[in-house]
Image (cartoon, helix red, strand yellow):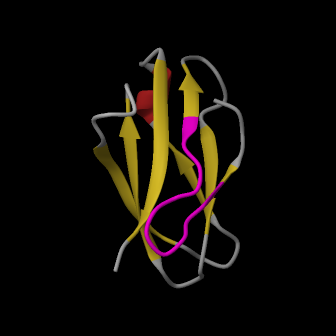
């Protein structure tokens, strides 16, 4: 997966990220500091599963998903938690 920022907005992320096994599996989620986001992952962009719920500090939240090294492809999205 290439490094990029996932910017979470009020309802859903503006970006889905693609991961390749063996590639750099780090991402940073940025959004309104103090809010939390639900990180979801998918193998097919149809079925999404919860990967984590993380708080957003001012510097952004770095994510490392161990599943990214065992799957040929993974997509990610960040969804705002009310």
Q: Residue at x 57, y 39 (%)?
A: 17
Q: Residue at x 44, y 74 (%)?
A: 36
Q: Count the numbered circles shown.
A: 0
Point out the stretch of residues depicted in magenta: 6-17
Where is residue 21, by image quadrant? top right
As displayed, is residue 31 above or below residue 63? below
Q: Residue at x 47, y 57 (%)?
A: 78
As displayed, is residue 62 above or below residue 24? below
Q: Position of residue 23 (x, y in %)?
A: 64, 22
As displayed, is residue 19 above or below residue 22? below
Task: Tell me the quadrant of the picture where the N terminus can be found.
Answer: top right
Task: Tell me the quadrant of the picture where the C terminus can be found.
Answer: bottom left
Q: Is residue 41 left or right of residue 17?
A: left
Magenta-colored stretch includes residue 10? yes
- Decide which of 59, 30 is in the foreground and name it: 30
Q: Position of residue 18 (x, y in %)?
A: 57, 31
**Residue that lies at the very extreme toward the bottom in this rendered image:** 34
Q: Position of residue 76 (x, y in %)?
A: 48, 42
- Decide which of 10, 28 is in the foreground and name it: 10
Q: Residue at x 39, y 33 (%)?
A: 45
Q: Is residue 2 left or right of residue 20?
A: right
As displayed, is residue 68 above or below residue 30? above
User: What's the magenta bit mostly, secondary-structure-wise?
Assistant: loop
Magenta-colored stretch includes residue 38? no
- Decide which of 32, 55 is in the foreground and name it: 32
Q: Position of residue 62 (x, y in %)?
A: 61, 56
């Amino acid at each position: 997966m290439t490094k990029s920022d996932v910017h979470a907005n009020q309802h859903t992320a503006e970006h889905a990220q693609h991961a390749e096994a063996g590639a750099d599996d780090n991402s940073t989620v940025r959004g309104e500091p103090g809010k939390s986001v639900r990180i979801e992952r998918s193998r097919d962009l149809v079925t999404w599963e919860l990967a984590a719920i993380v708080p957003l500090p001012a510097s952004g939240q770095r994510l490392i998903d161990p599943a990214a090294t065992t799957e040929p492809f993974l997509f990610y999205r960040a969804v705002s938690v009310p």
